[in-house]
Image: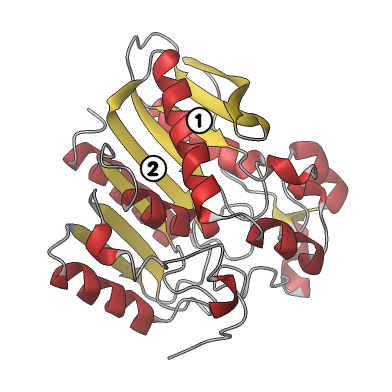
Amino acid sequence: MNVHPKIPSDVIGLTTAPSLSRRGFFMTASAATAAGYTLLAGPVRAQVVTTDTKGLKVGDATVKVAGGDMPVYFARPEKAKNPPVVLVAMEIFGLHEYIKDVTRRLAKAGAFAIAPDYYFRSGQDLTKITEMPKLMPVVNAKPDAELLADLDATVAWAKKQGGNTGKLAIIGFCRGGRTVWQYAAHNKNLKAGVAFYGSLVDPPAQKEKWPKSPTELAPDMKAPVLGLYGEADAGIPVAQVEAMKEALAKAKKKAEFKLYPGAPHAFHADYRPSYRKEAAEDGWNQALAWLKKNKVLS
């Protein structure tokens, strides 16, 4: 089944507004901006998950890549000498507070987690863009080859900072979930990936910049991936998830999937109306268990 074939599946249903009866549960736009969240994804839930920095070393840095210095946000256990490295692949909305908090959550679990801002070459702060038609040309212009090179450079940087790249993983959300599948097919040193509702089929118009979709790359997977999807995702129908499972099984690649009944796209995004607490918490526990199972985390 094809759903909105000309629109990337990680865009459909992202900006659903809350009902009037729920408006009191959301931050105002000014408060969301002050807290460091993206503006485009709609009102921000007042009850967002927040992770402190106690016991962590966190900060901003830059990684040299083709075309300039790429900003990254990192978090790592303060006293760990050689922690495992986990890349955090962001949504289309830029490197904002939700992604930074996820990075800190991974650090609390023992990882040297790094979220690279690989859309930096546009010269725009994606978190401040308020219209989807202005955002999509920026993120869709990113070629897969450049994306993968940026991730490789981030891994090399992490190694220089004392990270254990022999225990390397990637976790991503939305468009970042697609990135997980792409990177798992690219890096032979990757130990595990976790894709939260990453698109599996690409729009035909993107073929030049995105030569192969995750489903087409199934035979090339070099690391086991856990796919976490919502059964009620308006952009990624269950049929596409089942097709990916079949393609991976046919290629004899290791992967697991979990479908959450009634969960929409972005069910883990605790700052948005799409958040579903039970699915989000279970998904996070599944993700950590997967990283432990594949010997990334202790």
Helix, strand or loop under label 1 = helix
Q: Nearer the viewer, residue 43 or 255?
A: 255
- Can residue 43 be seen here? yes
Q: Position of residue 83 (x, y in %)?
A: 33, 19
Which of the labelled discs sits on residue 170, or is there none?
Answer: 2
Q: Earlier in the sequence, mark 2 or mark 1?
A: 1
The crowding category of the residue bearing disc 1, from other C-alpha atoms within 10 Å (few below 14, some 14 to 19, many at least 20), is many
- Position of 219 compared to 20: left or right? left
The residue at the point 54 percent across, 36 percent down is: 115
x 62%, y 39%: residue = 117
Work out whether 37 lies above or below 10: above
User: In the rendering, at what x and y percent does residue 29 appear?
Assistant: 84, 52
Comparing 12 with 137, the one in front is 137
| Residue 281 visible in the shown view | no
User: Looking at the image, is 213 positioned above or below residue 43?
Assistant: below
Mark 1: amino acid: Arg
Picture coordinates of residue 124, whole percent (x, y): 80, 45
- Decide: is 64 above or below 241: above
The amino acid type, in three-letter code, at marker 2 is: Ile
Name the disc covering residue 262, or none.
Answer: none
Task: Provide residue 54's location: percent of width, then percent of height.
Answer: 51, 17
Mark 2 Cα-neighbour bin, 10 Å: few <14, some 14–19, many ≥20: many
Residue with the most extreme bottom position? 1
